[in-house]
Amino acid sequence: MKTLDHSISRSPAASQTERLLFAISRREQELFLPAFRPDSLGQVAMEWHDPLDAVESWPDALRRFRPTVLVACWSTPLLPEPTPGQPSPRYICHLAGSVRNVVPRWFIERGGIVSNWGNAVCEQVAEQALLLALSALRNAPGWRTYIRDYAPLHASPALVLKTRSLYGRRVGIHGFGRIARALLELLHPFRVDVVVYSEGVPPEYILAHGATPLDTLEELFSQSEVLFECEALTPQTHLSVTRTLLAALPDDAVFVNVGRGLTVDESALEEEAASGRLRVAVDVVHEEPVTESTSLFAIETAILSPHIGGPTSDEHPRCGKFALSNIQRYLSGQPIQARVTLEAFDRST
Protein backbone atom coordinates (compact mmCIF):
# COMPACT_ATOMS: atom_id res chain seq x y z
CA MET A 1 0.00 0.00 0.00
CA LYS A 2 1.37 3.42 -0.86
CA THR A 3 0.62 6.83 0.58
CA LEU A 4 -0.07 9.74 -1.77
CA ASP A 5 1.24 13.12 -0.64
CA HIS A 6 -1.11 15.84 -1.86
CA SER A 7 -2.88 18.91 -0.56
CA ILE A 8 -4.96 21.93 -1.42
CA SER A 9 -6.57 24.53 0.79
CA ARG A 10 -8.82 22.75 3.28
CA SER A 11 -10.03 22.97 6.85
CA PRO A 12 -7.26 21.74 9.22
CA ALA A 13 -9.84 19.94 11.36
CA ALA A 14 -11.15 18.01 8.39
CA SER A 15 -7.68 17.13 7.15
CA GLN A 16 -6.80 15.66 10.54
CA THR A 17 -9.91 13.52 10.88
CA GLU A 18 -10.77 12.23 7.39
CA ARG A 19 -8.76 9.33 6.00
CA LEU A 20 -9.58 7.95 2.53
CA LEU A 21 -8.69 4.40 1.55
CA PHE A 22 -9.10 3.49 -2.13
CA ALA A 23 -9.40 -0.31 -1.90
CA ILE A 24 -9.74 -0.97 -5.62
CA SER A 25 -7.71 -2.79 -8.24
CA ARG A 26 -5.54 -1.08 -10.82
CA ARG A 27 -7.99 -2.11 -13.55
CA GLU A 28 -10.92 -0.63 -11.61
CA GLN A 29 -8.98 2.59 -11.17
CA GLU A 30 -8.35 2.74 -14.93
CA LEU A 31 -12.03 2.09 -15.68
CA PHE A 32 -13.68 4.44 -13.22
CA LEU A 33 -11.03 7.03 -12.33
CA PRO A 34 -8.78 7.43 -15.39
CA ALA A 35 -8.22 11.15 -14.87
CA PHE A 36 -8.38 11.28 -11.08
CA ARG A 37 -6.24 13.91 -9.37
CA PRO A 38 -5.72 13.25 -5.65
CA ASP A 39 -5.64 16.97 -4.85
CA SER A 40 -9.22 17.27 -6.12
CA LEU A 41 -10.41 15.88 -2.79
CA GLY A 42 -8.49 18.32 -0.65
CA GLN A 43 -5.91 17.99 2.09
CA VAL A 44 -6.85 14.58 3.41
CA ALA A 45 -4.84 11.50 4.25
CA MET A 46 -5.15 9.05 1.38
CA GLU A 47 -3.87 5.59 0.54
CA TRP A 48 -4.38 3.02 -2.22
CA HIS A 49 -4.75 -0.68 -1.53
CA ASP A 50 -5.01 -3.01 -4.52
CA PRO A 51 -6.85 -6.11 -3.24
CA LEU A 52 -5.51 -8.15 -6.15
CA ASP A 53 -1.87 -7.21 -5.58
CA ALA A 54 -1.48 -6.45 -1.90
CA VAL A 55 1.25 -7.68 0.42
CA GLU A 56 -0.59 -6.46 3.50
CA SER A 57 -3.73 -8.35 4.50
CA TRP A 58 -7.10 -6.61 4.31
CA PRO A 59 -7.74 -6.61 8.09
CA ASP A 60 -4.18 -5.41 8.74
CA ALA A 61 -4.54 -2.59 6.21
CA LEU A 62 -7.74 -1.41 7.89
CA ARG A 63 -6.23 -1.60 11.37
CA ARG A 64 -3.12 0.32 10.37
CA PHE A 65 -4.64 3.08 8.24
CA ARG A 66 -7.95 3.40 10.13
CA PRO A 67 -9.92 4.87 7.19
CA THR A 68 -12.98 7.01 7.76
CA VAL A 69 -13.93 6.77 4.08
CA LEU A 70 -13.58 3.57 2.07
CA VAL A 71 -13.75 3.69 -1.73
CA ALA A 72 -14.77 0.24 -2.94
CA CYS A 73 -15.48 -1.70 -6.12
CA TRP A 74 -15.89 -5.28 -7.34
CA SER A 75 -12.53 -6.50 -6.03
CA THR A 76 -12.85 -4.98 -2.56
CA PRO A 77 -13.13 -7.64 0.18
CA LEU A 78 -16.00 -7.73 2.66
CA LEU A 79 -15.57 -5.25 5.51
CA PRO A 80 -14.68 -7.31 8.60
CA GLU A 81 -16.24 -6.81 12.01
CA PRO A 82 -13.99 -4.29 13.82
CA THR A 83 -11.97 -5.56 16.75
CA PRO A 84 -12.27 -3.83 20.14
CA GLY A 85 -10.80 -0.36 19.92
CA GLN A 86 -10.71 -0.47 16.12
CA PRO A 87 -12.97 2.17 14.51
CA SER A 88 -15.01 1.25 11.46
CA PRO A 89 -15.17 3.49 8.38
CA ARG A 90 -18.01 5.98 8.53
CA TYR A 91 -18.68 6.08 4.78
CA ILE A 92 -18.29 3.43 2.06
CA CYS A 93 -18.43 4.88 -1.44
CA HIS A 94 -18.94 2.02 -3.89
CA LEU A 95 -17.98 2.83 -7.48
CA ALA A 96 -20.33 0.19 -8.89
CA GLY A 97 -23.83 -1.13 -8.15
CA SER A 98 -24.23 -4.10 -5.82
CA VAL A 99 -22.59 -3.49 -2.44
CA ARG A 100 -23.32 -6.81 -0.74
CA ASN A 101 -19.87 -8.31 -1.38
CA VAL A 102 -18.27 -5.38 0.43
CA VAL A 103 -20.78 -4.02 2.92
CA PRO A 104 -22.17 -6.19 5.74
CA ARG A 105 -25.70 -5.45 6.87
CA TRP A 106 -24.49 -4.48 10.34
CA PHE A 107 -22.56 -1.54 8.89
CA ILE A 108 -25.77 0.18 7.76
CA GLU A 109 -27.66 -0.92 10.87
CA ARG A 110 -25.08 0.87 13.02
CA GLY A 111 -25.42 4.11 11.09
CA GLY A 112 -22.73 3.66 8.45
CA ILE A 113 -23.23 5.59 5.21
CA VAL A 114 -23.13 3.68 1.91
CA SER A 115 -23.56 4.92 -1.65
CA ASN A 116 -23.27 3.33 -5.08
CA TRP A 117 -23.68 4.46 -8.67
CA GLY A 118 -27.41 4.97 -8.10
CA ASN A 119 -29.36 5.66 -11.27
CA ALA A 120 -26.22 6.13 -13.35
CA VAL A 121 -26.57 2.83 -15.26
CA CYS A 122 -30.29 2.13 -15.04
CA GLU A 123 -31.03 3.70 -18.41
CA GLN A 124 -28.30 1.63 -20.05
CA VAL A 125 -29.61 -1.63 -18.58
CA ALA A 126 -33.10 -0.68 -19.73
CA GLU A 127 -31.65 0.03 -23.17
CA GLN A 128 -30.12 -3.47 -23.20
CA ALA A 129 -33.48 -4.96 -22.20
CA LEU A 130 -35.20 -3.21 -25.09
CA LEU A 131 -32.46 -4.35 -27.47
CA LEU A 132 -32.90 -7.96 -26.36
CA ALA A 133 -36.67 -7.81 -26.77
CA LEU A 134 -36.48 -6.28 -30.24
CA SER A 135 -33.79 -8.77 -31.28
CA ALA A 136 -35.97 -11.65 -30.16
CA LEU A 137 -39.06 -10.28 -31.88
CA ARG A 138 -37.14 -9.81 -35.13
CA ASN A 139 -35.48 -13.22 -34.72
CA ALA A 140 -31.90 -11.96 -34.85
CA PRO A 141 -30.43 -15.47 -34.29
CA GLY A 142 -31.95 -16.59 -37.60
CA TRP A 143 -30.60 -13.81 -39.79
CA ARG A 144 -27.38 -15.56 -40.84
CA THR A 145 -29.20 -18.80 -41.61
CA TYR A 146 -31.71 -16.93 -43.75
CA ILE A 147 -29.01 -15.08 -45.68
CA ARG A 148 -27.11 -18.31 -46.31
CA ASP A 149 -29.97 -20.71 -47.06
CA TYR A 150 -33.07 -18.76 -48.05
CA ALA A 151 -32.03 -15.46 -49.61
CA PRO A 152 -30.77 -17.20 -52.79
CA LEU A 153 -34.28 -18.70 -53.16
CA HIS A 154 -35.88 -15.23 -52.92
CA ALA A 155 -37.97 -16.40 -49.97
CA SER A 156 -39.74 -13.73 -47.94
CA PRO A 157 -37.50 -12.91 -44.95
CA ALA A 158 -40.41 -11.80 -42.75
CA LEU A 159 -42.25 -15.08 -43.35
CA VAL A 160 -39.23 -17.34 -43.01
CA LEU A 161 -37.97 -15.60 -39.87
CA LYS A 162 -41.45 -15.08 -38.41
CA THR A 163 -40.60 -11.55 -37.38
CA ARG A 164 -42.87 -9.67 -35.02
CA SER A 165 -43.28 -6.05 -33.93
CA LEU A 166 -43.27 -4.60 -30.43
CA TYR A 167 -45.89 -1.98 -31.27
CA GLY A 168 -49.18 -2.51 -29.49
CA ARG A 169 -48.07 -5.57 -27.55
CA ARG A 170 -49.13 -6.56 -24.06
CA VAL A 171 -45.92 -6.13 -22.06
CA GLY A 172 -45.30 -7.43 -18.55
CA ILE A 173 -42.60 -6.30 -16.15
CA HIS A 174 -41.64 -8.33 -13.09
CA GLY A 175 -40.08 -5.90 -10.63
CA PHE A 176 -40.46 -2.15 -10.41
CA GLY A 177 -37.11 -0.76 -9.36
CA ARG A 178 -35.10 1.91 -11.13
CA ILE A 179 -34.31 -0.27 -14.17
CA ALA A 180 -37.94 -1.25 -14.65
CA ARG A 181 -39.05 2.38 -14.43
CA ALA A 182 -36.38 3.43 -16.93
CA LEU A 183 -37.57 0.66 -19.25
CA LEU A 184 -41.14 1.90 -18.93
CA GLU A 185 -40.02 5.27 -20.30
CA LEU A 186 -38.35 3.61 -23.29
CA LEU A 187 -41.50 1.62 -24.04
CA HIS A 188 -43.81 4.64 -24.33
CA PRO A 189 -43.28 5.25 -28.09
CA PHE A 190 -44.31 1.67 -28.87
CA ARG A 191 -47.86 2.23 -27.57
CA VAL A 192 -47.71 -0.93 -25.49
CA ASP A 193 -50.06 -1.90 -22.69
CA VAL A 194 -47.78 -2.43 -19.66
CA VAL A 195 -48.72 -4.56 -16.67
CA VAL A 196 -46.51 -4.92 -13.60
CA TYR A 197 -46.10 -7.20 -10.62
CA SER A 198 -43.59 -6.50 -7.86
CA GLU A 199 -44.22 -7.80 -4.37
CA GLY A 200 -44.34 -5.03 -1.79
CA VAL A 201 -44.69 -2.16 -4.27
CA PRO A 202 -47.92 -0.21 -3.69
CA PRO A 203 -50.34 -0.38 -6.64
CA GLU A 204 -50.73 3.40 -6.48
CA TYR A 205 -47.01 3.81 -7.15
CA ILE A 206 -47.21 1.66 -10.29
CA LEU A 207 -50.33 3.47 -11.48
CA ALA A 208 -48.61 6.82 -10.98
CA HIS A 209 -45.96 5.72 -13.50
CA GLY A 210 -48.53 4.84 -16.14
CA ALA A 211 -48.59 1.06 -15.78
CA THR A 212 -51.26 -1.35 -14.54
CA PRO A 213 -50.50 -3.29 -11.34
CA LEU A 214 -51.47 -6.95 -11.13
CA ASP A 215 -52.09 -9.02 -8.02
CA THR A 216 -50.06 -12.13 -8.81
CA LEU A 217 -47.16 -13.41 -10.87
CA GLU A 218 -49.54 -15.90 -12.46
CA GLU A 219 -51.62 -13.04 -13.86
CA LEU A 220 -48.50 -11.26 -15.08
CA PHE A 221 -47.10 -14.21 -17.01
CA SER A 222 -50.38 -15.41 -18.47
CA GLN A 223 -51.20 -11.94 -19.82
CA SER A 224 -47.80 -10.93 -21.26
CA GLU A 225 -46.71 -11.29 -24.87
CA VAL A 226 -43.35 -9.78 -23.92
CA LEU A 227 -42.12 -10.35 -20.36
CA PHE A 228 -39.23 -8.39 -18.85
CA GLU A 229 -37.65 -9.92 -15.75
CA CYS A 230 -36.23 -7.01 -13.72
CA GLU A 231 -36.81 -8.12 -10.13
CA ALA A 232 -34.03 -7.99 -7.54
CA LEU A 233 -32.72 -11.25 -6.10
CA THR A 234 -33.84 -11.82 -2.52
CA PRO A 235 -34.69 -14.96 -0.54
CA GLN A 236 -38.31 -14.38 -1.58
CA THR A 237 -37.57 -13.98 -5.32
CA HIS A 238 -34.97 -16.76 -5.57
CA LEU A 239 -36.24 -19.12 -8.32
CA SER A 240 -39.62 -17.38 -8.13
CA VAL A 241 -40.02 -17.66 -11.91
CA THR A 242 -40.97 -21.31 -11.95
CA ARG A 243 -41.55 -23.84 -14.69
CA THR A 244 -45.29 -23.31 -14.20
CA LEU A 245 -45.01 -19.55 -14.69
CA LEU A 246 -42.92 -19.92 -17.84
CA ALA A 247 -45.49 -22.38 -19.18
CA ALA A 248 -48.19 -19.76 -18.55
CA LEU A 249 -46.62 -17.38 -21.08
CA PRO A 250 -48.48 -17.45 -24.42
CA ASP A 251 -46.95 -19.40 -27.30
CA ASP A 252 -44.25 -17.40 -29.12
CA ALA A 253 -43.98 -14.94 -26.23
CA VAL A 254 -40.69 -13.17 -25.54
CA PHE A 255 -38.91 -13.64 -22.20
CA VAL A 256 -36.13 -11.15 -21.38
CA ASN A 257 -34.04 -11.24 -18.20
CA VAL A 258 -31.85 -8.28 -17.25
CA GLY A 259 -32.37 -8.74 -13.50
CA ARG A 260 -30.68 -11.73 -11.91
CA GLY A 261 -30.30 -15.22 -13.31
CA LEU A 262 -31.19 -16.91 -10.04
CA THR A 263 -34.72 -15.53 -10.04
CA VAL A 264 -35.53 -18.03 -12.82
CA ASP A 265 -35.74 -21.81 -13.05
CA GLU A 266 -32.98 -22.01 -15.65
CA SER A 267 -33.53 -25.62 -16.70
CA ALA A 268 -37.19 -24.85 -17.43
CA LEU A 269 -36.17 -21.75 -19.37
CA GLU A 270 -33.69 -23.78 -21.43
CA GLU A 271 -36.42 -26.30 -22.29
CA GLU A 272 -38.78 -23.54 -23.41
CA ALA A 273 -36.05 -22.00 -25.56
CA ALA A 274 -34.95 -25.32 -27.06
CA SER A 275 -38.52 -26.26 -27.97
CA GLY A 276 -39.00 -22.95 -29.76
CA ARG A 277 -42.19 -22.19 -27.85
CA LEU A 278 -40.69 -19.06 -26.28
CA ARG A 279 -38.28 -16.48 -27.65
CA VAL A 280 -35.64 -16.21 -24.93
CA ALA A 281 -33.15 -13.36 -24.58
CA VAL A 282 -31.14 -12.95 -21.38
CA ASP A 283 -28.24 -10.89 -20.07
CA VAL A 284 -27.89 -12.88 -16.83
CA VAL A 285 -27.64 -16.59 -15.98
CA HIS A 286 -27.18 -18.73 -12.88
CA GLU A 287 -23.42 -19.10 -13.17
CA GLU A 288 -21.39 -16.17 -14.42
CA PRO A 289 -19.33 -15.28 -16.31
CA VAL A 290 -20.99 -16.84 -19.35
CA THR A 291 -18.88 -19.43 -21.15
CA GLU A 292 -19.34 -21.85 -24.04
CA SER A 293 -20.46 -24.43 -21.49
CA THR A 294 -23.42 -22.27 -20.44
CA SER A 295 -26.46 -24.33 -21.45
CA LEU A 296 -28.29 -21.48 -23.19
CA PHE A 297 -25.20 -20.85 -25.33
CA ALA A 298 -25.85 -24.13 -27.18
CA ILE A 299 -29.43 -23.18 -28.10
CA GLU A 300 -29.18 -21.42 -31.46
CA THR A 301 -32.52 -19.65 -31.16
CA ALA A 302 -31.74 -18.15 -27.75
CA ILE A 303 -30.10 -14.74 -27.40
CA LEU A 304 -27.44 -14.62 -24.70
CA SER A 305 -25.49 -11.47 -23.91
CA PRO A 306 -22.59 -11.71 -21.40
CA HIS A 307 -23.99 -9.47 -18.64
CA ILE A 308 -23.27 -6.24 -20.51
CA GLY A 309 -26.42 -4.33 -19.58
CA GLY A 310 -24.53 -1.55 -17.90
CA PRO A 311 -22.51 0.41 -17.60
CA THR A 312 -21.30 0.52 -21.18
CA SER A 313 -17.55 1.00 -21.62
CA ASP A 314 -17.92 4.72 -22.24
CA GLU A 315 -19.92 5.27 -19.04
CA HIS A 316 -17.48 3.99 -16.38
CA PRO A 317 -15.70 7.35 -16.02
CA ARG A 318 -19.04 9.10 -15.49
CA CYS A 319 -19.78 6.69 -12.65
CA GLY A 320 -16.36 7.48 -11.20
CA LYS A 321 -17.02 11.22 -11.34
CA PHE A 322 -20.33 10.65 -9.57
CA ALA A 323 -18.53 8.76 -6.79
CA LEU A 324 -15.92 11.50 -6.40
CA SER A 325 -18.63 14.13 -6.19
CA ASN A 326 -20.24 12.10 -3.40
CA ILE A 327 -16.94 11.98 -1.53
CA GLN A 328 -16.62 15.74 -1.87
CA ARG A 329 -20.17 16.11 -0.57
CA TYR A 330 -19.35 13.93 2.42
CA LEU A 331 -16.17 15.85 3.20
CA SER A 332 -18.04 19.15 3.08
CA GLY A 333 -20.91 17.90 5.22
CA GLN A 334 -23.52 17.76 2.46
CA PRO A 335 -26.06 14.92 1.99
CA ILE A 336 -24.87 11.91 0.01
CA GLN A 337 -26.59 11.06 -3.27
CA ALA A 338 -27.61 7.49 -4.20
CA ARG A 339 -27.42 6.45 -0.57
CA VAL A 340 -28.06 2.75 0.04
CA THR A 341 -30.63 2.47 2.81
CA LEU A 342 -31.25 -0.67 4.83
CA GLU A 343 -34.43 -1.28 2.83
CA ALA A 344 -32.55 -0.91 -0.46
CA PHE A 345 -29.78 -3.17 0.84
CA ASP A 346 -32.27 -5.92 1.69
CA ARG A 347 -33.78 -5.73 -1.81
CA SER A 348 -30.44 -5.63 -3.60
CA THR A 349 -28.30 -8.46 -4.92
Image (cartoon, rainbow, N blue to C red):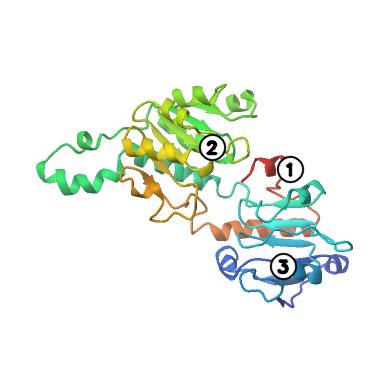
Q: Position of residue 9 (x, y in %)?
A: 79, 70
Single out the mark in the foreground, 1 or 2. Answer: 2
> With 71 as the anchor, is 316 left or right in this view?
left
Residue toward you, 33 or 61? 61
Q: Earlier in the sequence, mark 3 or mark 1?
A: 3
**At label 3, which amino acid type do we have?**
Trp
Q: CA distance from mark 3 to mark 1?
A: 25 Å
Q: Quadrant of residue 89?
A: bottom right
Residue visible at 42% across and 56% down?
Answer: 291
- Badge 3 crowding class, 10 Å Cα cut-off, few under 14, some 14 to 19, many 20 or more, is some
Residue visible at 68% across and 41% down?
Answer: 346
Which type of secondary structure does the marked residue at label 1 adopt? helix
The residue to which callout 2 is attached is: 239
Single out the mark in the foreground, 3 or 2. Answer: 2
**Mark 3–mark 2 CB contact (< 8 Å):** no
Residue visible at 47% across and 51% down?
Answer: 307
**At label 1, which amino acid type do we have?**
Leu
Q: CA distance from mark 1 to mark 2?
A: 23 Å
Residue toward you, 318 or 60? 60
The residue to which callout 3 is attached is: 58
> With 28 as the anchor, is 88 left or right in this view?
right
**At label 2, which amino acid type do we have?**
Leu
- Badge 2 crowding class, 10 Å Cα cut-off, few under 14, some 14 to 19, many 20 or more, is some
